[in-house]
Every structure is written in C-alpha cells, then in structure tokens.
Amino acid sequence: MNTLDSKQVAEIYRKHLSTGRAWLAELTGGHIETTSSGARVQAEDVEYLDCGGYGVFILGHRHPRVVDAVIAQIHRNPMATRLLLEPTAAVAAQALIGVAPHGLTRAHFVNSGAEAVEAAIKFARAQGRTHLISAINGYHGKTMGALSLTARSMYQDPFTPLLPNVAHVPYGDTSALVQALAAIGGRACVVLEPVQGEAGVVVPPDGYLREAARLCREHGALFVLDEVQTGLGRLGHWWGADREGVTADMVLVGKNLSGGVIPVAAVLATEEVYAPFAADPLLHTSTFAASPVAMAAAATSIEVLRDEQLIARAEHLGGLITCTLRNLLQEHAPHLGAEVRGAGLLIGVELPSPHVAGDLVLELQNRHVLVNHSLNASGVLRLTPPAVMTDADLDWLFTAFTAAARAVGDRHPVVTAERTF
Ligand code: PMP
C-alpha cells in the first residue's frame, strides 16, 4: 500500500501529523518501519532489535497465532452489531478472568490504557468514591480523568482545571498514604502501579502494596492496581498483584493484552464494584469496545502466554538481562554510576543525567537497538523486551550495549548528577 519514501513520509508528518514526531524520528536516522517479526523490526534496509515498544510486545511482533486468530476473525466478523450476543467477547472474558488476580470476576473491555483508567474512575464514583489518590510521578494516561491521576506538572499544567478531589502521595511511603486516607477515608479510591514504569522503573519497598491494600480496607477506600504496563507477564509474574499476594477491587490491563496486534485494554473488577454496570449495560459504553478483532487478539494472547510458558521465560530473561547490563556498565563505564533495576522484563537503567541517558539511547539506536526513555524520568532508559527473544537477539543486545556503554563512558569522562524528573 505504501509507495512513499522516508523523505515524503517525514514531510507529511511535518505538514499534517506532528512536526515534533518528524524531528524525533529524524534524530534517529529517519527510517520508515515496514515489517516486523519477533523482536525484530525492519525499517527500509535496516533491521532493528526492538527492546522498547512501550511495554506492548511481550509476545514480540506479529506472533503467528495472534495474527492468524485476528485474520480469521476479520474474515468471519470483524465488528459486531452490538445488539446480538457476540461469542469472541465471551471467549476473551473467560480467558482473562481465568488468569485474573483473586476475586476479580468481571471484565470490562475498552480500547486503551487511559480508557481503562477513565472507566475505573467512573466505577469508583458509582461506589460513592468521589476522591482519588495516586502516586507522584505515576503514569495513568493523558485523557482528562487519567491525567488528573498522572501526577506530573509538565503534562497537567497546560490543561487545568482537571478533576477535583485528587491527592498525590509519594510512592512507597505508607505514612503519607495513611495521612491522605485519614482525611477522606470512605470516599477515597487509591490508584497505584505495582512497579512505576514511566517514573523510571521504580520498584516499591517490600510489603508496600500489601500495606497499601490493607490501609484501603481499613479506611473503607477502594484499591485499584494500574497494571496496564506490568500486567500479563511483564514482571515475570502474571500480575504485579501476584508478586506481593495483594487483592485489589480493580486491576487495569492494556498493552500486552493486545498481543502487539490490535489495541485493547480492560478493567477487571469484583462483583460488588461492577454491579451497577452489570445491571445497566448503557451506563458506560464505547462504540469500538470489545470489538471481535480485539477480542480475538486478547483471547489468543492469553493462550500464547500460557501455552508457551512465557511468564517463566520473562522472569528468566529479565534476570539475565538486568544482571548482564549491570555488569557491562560496571565493566565499561563504572564512573557513570549507573543503576540497573527492575522486575522481569521491565528494566530501567538510571544514568546520572538526562543528557547521558539520551546519549545512551542514541548510541544503542546507532547499533540498531531500540529502547525507550521514561516519560516521567528523562534520566532513566527503559527496556521492555519481548519474552520471545532468541539467543541471537540476546547476543545482539549485549554486544550493542557493550559498545554503546563504552562510547557514552568515553564521551562523559566526568559526570555531574542532575535531577532526572
Ligand atoms: N497506565 C500505565 C501504568 C501506563 O504505563 C500507561 C501507558 N504507558 C497507561 C496507563 C496509559 O495507556 P495508554 O497509553 O494505552 O492510554
């Protein structure tokens, strides 16, 4: 279908899409991506190793089973009437609830992570929870309700006023949470990530989530885990909730649910929380939500995660990559004092400044390895590689990382730490 070359594409971006996006793409060579498979993305005559993807590609690109299921669904019935019963939604809901954290029996499908957050805010309101509490530097999306929870002034300030009655507490700090809850108790809904992704892969202190869940119960608040980035295997567990054995009133899922093929997200809720919406199907609707193509992608992605034992593979690969990157930085650029941290295949590399982090991203891209920066922590480079990485992919990553770390270390012989937020 595409007959445009990279210059023409960049020109159209500049004119009709986003000038900034065109500029960013040109910084990294200005290639246009054309095909993808597993951990590899082809851009014209250059092959990239994709260790970024903003947390979407736990199954890699174009997993054949997901692609086949989606194509078969397109041939059968891609969009539904929304008046008759539609079986792929039932299959996807059963599959998702089958692997959901304890106590969550209802699935409400939407089209994006931010929409899942919006739905959760309404579910909470319907339970009389008019006040929201989220964590500083947490990320929950950029629609108006979700943005009210995404506690970073850079994204919020141009759009105020946002939702009223939202408090932000330091992540990992249970006494701050107690204080916030004491003020609004039974009217509150607390929304937290099990590991903060966009804040620069911040792993909370042991027991934090369990204590947060307990405090919510004690104060009569609802507890929501935003697992849009962490859910479905990213942390080497099915859910972040499992890592600490916590139960929540709602868990939000997105990114990996798509299988990297069709956008889809969902709110998983308890019977009690979902009751008003189960009773009245028109209370919260969206034309494209639970479309059969998305449901085929979701149901098959869950099957693939289970059948190919990718959760265990994510845990194994995550440990290996984290440890290797830490050793490589220590060996080739020890003076940078970089910290490598994470859980499973959500891995953060904190550099002493955004400048050094940006340099490492570019050095990796020069060696055709894609990684992401963190939206709320520009000094932290983020890797969310697929759980289907092969040994050859790992070799590529480690060889490129060695050379990139050396190059960045040589360019910054003396480092001055700067704030990264
Ligand atoms: N919640 C979390 C934890 C996220 O990481 C993200 C996306 N980075 C979102 C919500 C928003 O998802 P989306 O971009 O699909 O709207």
Image (spheres, rainbow, N blue to C red):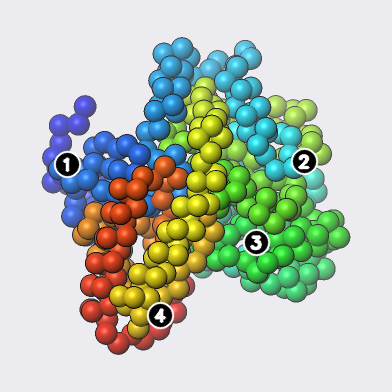
Q: Spatial distance from mark 4 to mark 2, Cα to Cα?
A: 43 Å
* Viewer-nearest residue: 131 or 178: 178
Q: Which mark is residue 342?
A: none
Which residue is under mark 1? 44
Position of residue 53 measured from the top left corner of the image (x, y, whole percent): 39, 48
Pointer 3 or 1: first along the chain: 1
- Identify the element where label 3 is drawn: strand
Which residue is under mark 3? 134
> Which amino acid type is shown beneath numbered disc 2?
Gly
Left or right, 105 with reference to 373:
right
The residue mark sitting in front, 3 or 1, is 1
Residue drawn at x 60%, y 17% as measured from the top left: 87
Position of residue 114 measured from the top left corner of the image (x, y, whole percent): 54, 47
Q: Spatial distance from mark 3 to mark 1, Cα to Cα?
A: 42 Å
Which residue is under mark 2? 103
Position of residue 17 measured from the top left corner of the image (x, y, whole percent): 29, 45
Q: Which corner quadrant holds the N terminus?
A: top left
Pointer 3 or 2: first along the chain: 2
Q: Give the vertical position of 380 relative to 10 (above or below).
A: below
Q: Spatial distance from mark 3 to mark 4, Cα to Cα?
A: 30 Å
Q: Are marks 4 and 2 in contact (CB under 8 Å)?
A: no
Pointer 4 or 2: first along the chain: 2
- Identify the element where label 2 is drawn: loop
> Which amino acid type is shown beneath numbered disc 4?
Gly
- The answer to whether residue 63 of the structure is visible from this angle is yes
> Which amino acid type is shown beneath numbered disc 1?
Glu
- Identify the element where label 1 is drawn: loop
Q: Spatial distance from mark 1 to mark 4, Cα to Cα?
A: 37 Å
Q: Is mark 3 within 8 Å of ligand 1?
A: no
The residue mark sitting in front, 1 or 4, is 4
The residue mark sitting in front, 3 or 4, is 4
